[in-house]
């Protein structure tokens, strides 16, 4: 008897909940709210593979060739005679290729010190949509070869003396759809330095970010602080800019106190001071090709 | 119901074909003909990484509108349809994409497979109907109407 009553009560409860359910919910979907979340890597932390001068955490996708043409014009404080610097352009051409969705290799040539570059970039970690991985970490290594004729040809000059290296980590995080920030520690090594008192090894810590103002445009900023090994009169690199995206192109327009567009140059050889107006207007224009 | 429903869309123009697949659709169909489909926008996979990025960032704005859905009823949905044959039905309801609701009547087929319903449907969606703005420079790469194919094998709960 007791068992029958129990079964009856359980039956009532079940029926009640079954009838109650459709009446409670506005949408059938409310009943299946438990559907598993899609966990995906966060995409488009930055619009391009660079924030302004420095690397972002992004790499070209698999089998994508990313071609960048970048200019830095002369110093804005040259005035009207040089059309505020536009008469003098320094250029960098770069090809980056996505071997996989996480690994890219690239080559580049800058007119600045006639420098050749070979680089490799690897997305070690990717931020996840559910924040089970809270940040993206991308590692970047570049070898640079100075192509200038030797200042003193009578001395014995080695090819290795032309080389310098930068190893970098980009630790990036995207908040919502608009704000992304990155911390960029860099280690710079030169095989040959100008004088005995100069350090071969240097360290900088950079920070960069972007804020999207529309779905296709963002305001970007970037700063690199000298930590160790840099001369006391060193100027830290500070850049402000904006990204404009149009389909397969990204235009990055900016003002920076660094003229060089490869890592060693803007991290350790920045010369212009913002307060003197010794700034360079410039742009990076990228185009992707699916191979 | 299912949580592995399949949604595919296909845009074709003389310049470029764009195709994406999603296997994470949750679908529910009740005995009275009431149904609901929910598609997580981030679950669409494209051939090219940049297409997927632009789809989420610029067009569907998946951060603000994470899901697309279609909810409504199938009229005259009875157990008599459980004969193992294909039946053409009309699914009437509200299609929500990019946060914009559209009243739609979508012809579909249903077939009872012994344990649940197999549902299939092919229909078109115009991005303009859902406030998805396509800039002039890429207008020749994205079709004005996009073909959507839905396929779900619903398992009785």
Image (tube, rainbow, N blue to C red):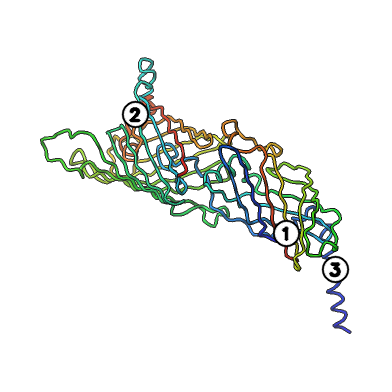
Residue for point 39% across, 20% down: A84
To which chain does the residue with label 2 belong? A
Q: Residues within 10 Å of mark 3 (few under 14, many from 20)?
A: few
Q: Residues within 10 Å of mark 1 (few under 14, many from 20)?
A: some
Position of residue B7 relative to residue B156, above or below, is: above
Q: Quadrant of the C terminus of chain B?
A: bottom right
Residue named by callout 2: A90
Quadrant in the rendering for residue A277: top left
To which chain does the residue with label 3 belong? A
Total marks placed: 3
- In space, the residues marked 3 and 1 are separated at their CA atoms by 19 Å
Q: Quadrant of the N terminus of chain B?
A: bottom right
- In space, the residues marked 1 and 2 are separated at their CA atoms by 59 Å
The image's mark for residue A32 is 1
Disc 2 secondary structure class = strand
- Give left or right: position of A49 versus A74: right
To which chain does the residue with label 1 belong? A
Disc 3 secondary structure class = helix
Residue for point 29% across, 42% down: A144
Q: Residue furthest left?
A: A154
Q: Position of residue A194 (x, y in %)?
A: 20, 38
Q: Position of residue A196 (x, y in %)?
A: 18, 41
- Residue B157 can be seen, yes or no: no
Residue named by callout 3: A15
Q: Residues within 10 Å of mark 2 (few under 14, many from 20)?
A: some
């Amino acid at each position: 008897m007791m068992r029958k009553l129990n079964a009856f009560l359980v039956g009532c409860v079940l029926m009640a909940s079954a009838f109650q359910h459709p009446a409670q919910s506005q949408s059938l979907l409310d009943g299946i709210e438990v559907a598993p979340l899609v966990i995906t890597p966060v995409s488009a932390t930055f619009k391009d593979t660079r924030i302004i001068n420095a690397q972002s955490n992004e790499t070209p996708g698999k089998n994508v060739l990313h071609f960048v043409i970048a200019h830095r014009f002369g110093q804005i404080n040259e005035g009207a005679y040089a059309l505020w610097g536009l008469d003098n352009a320094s250029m960098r051409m770069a090809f980056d290729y996505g071997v996989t969705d996480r690994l890219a290799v690239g080559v580049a040539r800058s007119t600045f010190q006639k420098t050749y570059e070979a680089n490799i970039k690897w997305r070690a970690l990717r931020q996840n949509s559910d924040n089970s991985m809270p940040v993206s970490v991308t590692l970047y290594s570049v070898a640079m070869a100075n192509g200038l004729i030797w200042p003193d040809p009578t001395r014995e000059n080695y090819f290795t003396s032309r080389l310098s290296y930068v190893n970098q980590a980009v630790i990036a995080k995207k908040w919502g759809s608009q704000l992304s920030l990155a911390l960029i520690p860099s280690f710079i090594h030169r095989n040959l330095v100008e004088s005995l008192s100069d350090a071969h090894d240097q360290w900088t810590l950079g920070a960069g970010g972007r804020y999207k103002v529309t779905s296709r445009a963002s305001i970007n900023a970037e700063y690199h602080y000298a930590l160790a090994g840099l001369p006391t009169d060193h100027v830290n690199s500070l850049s402000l800019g904006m990204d404009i995206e149009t389909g397969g192109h990204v235009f990055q327009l900016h003002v920076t106190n660094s003229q060089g567009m490869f890592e060693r140059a803007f991290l350790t050889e920045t010369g212009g001071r913002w307060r003197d107006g010794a700034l360079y207007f410039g742009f990076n224009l990228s185009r992707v090709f699916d191979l | 119901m299912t949580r592995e429903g399949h949604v595919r869309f296909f845009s074709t123009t003389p310049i470029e074909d764009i195709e994406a697949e999603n296997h994470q659709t949750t679908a529910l169909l009740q005995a009275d003909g009431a149904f609901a489909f929910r598609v997580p926008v981030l679950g669409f996979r494209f051939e090219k990484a940049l297409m997927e990025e632009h789809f989420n960032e610029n067009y569907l704005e998946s951060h603000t509108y994470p899901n697309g859905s279609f909810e409504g009823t199938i009229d005259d949905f009875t157990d008599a349809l459980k004969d193992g044959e294909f039946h053409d039905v009309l699914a009437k309801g509200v299609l929500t994409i990019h946060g914009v609701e559209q009243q739609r009547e979508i012809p579909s087929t249903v077939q009872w497979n012994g344990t649940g319903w197999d549902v299939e449907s092919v229909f078109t969606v115009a991005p303009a109907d859902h406030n998805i703005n396509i800039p002039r420079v890429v207008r020749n790469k994205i079709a004005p109407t996009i073909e959507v194919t839905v396929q779900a094998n619903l398992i009785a709960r």
